[in-house]
Amino acid sequence: MKVLFQAYNTCCQTESGGVQVRVRKIKQLLENRGIYVDFFSPFSTKIKDYDVLHIFSLKEESLGVAITAKKIGLKVVVSPIVNSTAWRAKAIRNTLLFPHVLRCLGIEPIEYQRYEILQLCDCIFVESKTEGDFISKYYKVDSDKIKIVPNGVEEQPLASKSIYEKINPNRKFVLQVGRVDSNKNTLNTIKAVKGADYDLVIIGGKFAGAADLYYEECVKEGKKLPNVHFLGWLDPKSDMLASAYQNSQAVVMPSKSETFGLVAVEAAMAGTHVCLSDNLAILDFGVFRKDFTFNSSDPNDIRRVLDKAMNTPKDNTVKELAKEIFSWDKIIDEHINTYKC
């Protein structure tokens, strides 16, 4: 069996990121099971040479590839990675009402193109029930076509103490990992830790090449606080990143929305506390502590939960649940079974 992976054009333009990490990991594990996997290139790939097209992230630029694959007879699987936000729901609803009128006005209805991809594909892999319900409702997709297939995780080997080359080894720290932007809500975390007796370590940065005033504001505010440290992007496989996870007292994810929340699962597997926005889809799985959730719009509430986590001894309760539910073996089985049926 030959499988073709396709994603949006800028998928790998940052040094790290959830989508590219996920895609590369799934490719590796499928190949370990004897499944041939390629990445799509518009200059060299012949779609007819494959059995399955798997699209990662629902973007309008994938429509032409999906249509071509279906005409040739490939099975098409889509992992949409759709944030279930109110503004997204409104955009979809309005676009699907008058797509042809918009085209007559010279406006390309992006959400309608995404709708077309979901209608023609054979199967949709969502990362949570929240995402699945959203797609079924707003893109008008038959729920029988939707499967909940979360991101996988594996236990990492014991890391060194290398993180302490960058920060004070005598202070506990809370960790935030990922892109620094308004959705990730980094500025509210910085505000939350002002005057705290522990440090905040931020690993990640802005999108490559982007002029981002929000990022600049975060850096400016962070420089005012002696307990805030920006380390930038790190290689996902680096010992420094593993060290940061394993030696942190807590990992915080104050995002306004996430389709899944890989950082939360990675943190759980590192045995650290996980502090989350109270509206995130990752909470659907019942793995994470509800008393470590907060209102992401309120720095004081974030601070309340961080203070609690920083003063609560770590244990492996959440880690053991995460190992059971987010097993890569089960997730790769689902991929292969879907591709073959």
Image (cartoon, grey):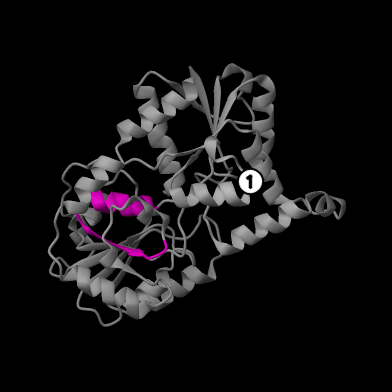
Residue at (34, 23) in percent of width and height: 32
Q: Where is residue 69 in the image (x, y as percent from the top left)?
A: 64, 26
> In terms of image quadrants, where is residue 122?
top right
Which residues fall within the magenta stretch? 261-279
Which of these two is toward me, 38 or 252?
252
Residue 74 lies in quadrant: top right
Residue 86 is left or right of residue 323, and the answer is right
Residue 280, compared with residue 270, is above or below; it is below
Residue at 42% x, 55% y is 281
- Percent x, y of residue 145: 54, 35
What is the secondary structure assignment of the residue under circle 1?
A: loop
Q: Nearer the viewer, residue 9 or 303?
A: 303
Q: In this view, does 171 lie to the left or right of 244?
A: left
Which residue type carries mark 1?
Lys
Q: Residue 242 or 165: which is nearer the viewer?
A: 242
Mark 1 neighbour class, 10 Å CA radius: few under 14, some 14 to 19, many 20 or more = some
Q: Where in the figure is residue 289, as x and y percent of width and height?
A: 26, 60
Q: Which residue is drawn at 46% across and 52% down?
A: 130
Does residue 260 lie above or below 30 as drawn?
below
Residue 126 appears in the picture as rendered: yes
Q: Which residue is drawn at 27% across and 53% down?
A: 267
Q: Is residue 255 magenta?
A: no
Q: Name the residue under label 1.
A: 140
Instruction: State the residue in front, 298 or 11.
Output: 298
